[in-house]
Image (cartoon, rainbow, N blue to C red):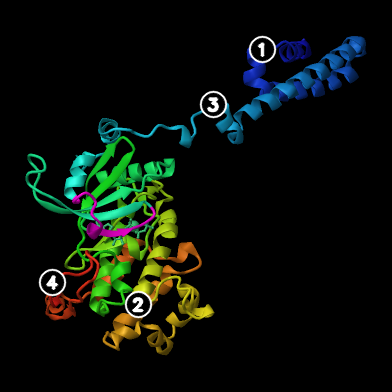
Amino acid sequence: MKLLRINFRGVIITDKQKKEQCPQILLLNQIEMRTTMKAQKSNNTFFEHLKNQNRDFIIVFVILYICFCHVTMLESPKDQSRSGRPTKDDRKLPSNPEEVEDLRRDSAANPLIAFTFGELKLITGNFRQDHLLGGGGFGNVYKGLITKDLREGLQPLQVAVKVHDGDNSYQGHREWLAEVIFLGQLSHPNLVKLIGYCCEDEQRVLIYEYMSRGSVENTLFSRVLLPLPWSIRMKIAYGAAKGLAFLHEAEKPVIYRDFKTSNILLDQDYNAKLSDFGLAKDGPIGDKTHVSTRIMGTYGFGVVLLELLTGRKSLDKSRPAREQNLTDWAIPLLKEKKKLLSIVDPRLEGDYPIKGVHKAAMLAYHCLNRNPKARPLMRDIVDSLEPLQEPEDVQNEKPVLTVIHGVADGQLKGKEGSM
Ligand SMILES: Nc1ncnc2c1ncn2[C@@H]1O[C@H](COP(=O)(O)OP(=O)(O)OP(=O)(O)O)[C@@H](O)[C@H]1O
Ligand SMILES: [Mg+2]
């Protein structure tokens, strides 16, 4: 009796069961078949009946197997994109300030000003060429001034206006939006402040606080400016590290994927602020956080620290072949005290604390470890750089800049600066 009951359950299945319970039913059928074989041996009177049953089993088994494969294919992750779900590229980007604010509603900590394109023309003197601060992958950046009479309630403020170059690419608009979203919710002394944006027709513009000394790239590798003193280099490294540590330790960590000297901007007092969040993405939350941010953040930091130490660009095609890639050339020399001094920026003319140089070099060495898990956390880097800072009052006594007339706007203005 028991045998018959099992057979009954295995053979008669509804369509719904076929879809939902295929694996289980298959298993059940295998058990059934084995049980049936045993029953054949022990009870010959059922022989003919069981032969027919086995044939039925094979037919059902084949049907169920086909059904099982079909369901598994439908659930395969590879096929999800083909199953009609929206892909990343299908998602609609906002096309006006209302839609931008709708998107920002849940996350926005900072109020942003939605400028009209007409207002930006006034701010930048109609994007005058002599207001041009530079240009990058996104488009040109202009210096601008918000005046009191631009709009009621606005305070006078110098700004940098970054204009998307108008290719209207999805990528450009997506980066613009990422910048608005990330910088709209983050606020820290070492992140450049986003003042507002413009989203009008095809125009996509970002309006930042103006950083009067431009980028670290322009300042560190300039042929016309005086070399940055060691203490300023360490101040820049410290500020940038604090910015990155803040991002990594945020409630929702942010992986800043574009860490390089051109994206570290300097205010009048050489406070470093990170800019360009177009490539940033949310970091993992929970256990995996530190692993991923180590990989993404600290190697890049090691490269920038090495650039500050040596005064060389991470890639410089104008140098002899074996010196073109900075990390390949410098890493083997970082650990040897005597050789280390031979790679420190010669423009410093020996004006640096040897112990400080050694510590900074060891820090760069650890950041550049091939094994991502062996690299320090950003917080450890901040702690290591802290003792390498000169007290502000000592820094203030050192003259660091001399005016060179005709230097591009945003790099230098005024006479004999001092820190
Ligand atoms: N807030 C700002 N204040 C002053 N100058 C700025 C500001 N933002 C950008 N700049 C200047 O504009 C120039 C271009 O910046 P942008 O970020 O567009 O390009 P990039 O960083 O050189 O290249 P990439 O597109 O790879 O980021 C930089 O050299 C920088 O000096
Ligand atoms: Mg940039």
- Segment colored magenta: 124-137
For marks 2 and 4, give the CA distance. 27 Å
Q: Earlier in the sequence, mark 1 or mark 4?
A: 1
Which quadrant of the figure shows ligand 2? bottom left
Q: Position of residue 329 (x, y in %)?
A: 49, 78
Find residue 205 and report its horizontal and vertical position in percent.
Answer: 28, 45
Q: CA distance from mark 3 to mark 1?
A: 24 Å
Distance between the Cα atoms at labels 1 and 4? 83 Å
Q: 150 or 39, which lies in front?
A: 150
Mark 3 — residue?
Answer: 84
Left or right for 199, reference 364: left
Q: Nearer the viewer, mark 1 or mark 4?
A: 4
**Residue at left offset 53%, top offset 78%:** 321
Residue 78: image quadrant is top right
Evaluate whether residue 383 shows in this view. no
The three-letter amino acid code for the residue at tag 1 is: Asp
Distance Cα–Cα, label 2 vs label 1: 71 Å
Relative depth, front residue between 46 and 22: 22
Residue drawn at the location 12% of the way across and 52% of the way down: 157
Quadrant location, the N terminus: top right
> Which mark is drawn over residue 309?
2
Q: Which mark is residue 414?
A: 4
How many numbered discs sit on the rendered protein?
A: 4
* Tag in front: 2 or 4: 4
**x%, y% of residue 233?**
27, 74
Of the residues under marks 4 and 3, which one precedes in the sequence? 3
Say which mark, if any, is on residue 15.
Answer: 1
Residue type beneath disc 4: Gly
Q: Quadrant of the C terminus?
A: bottom left
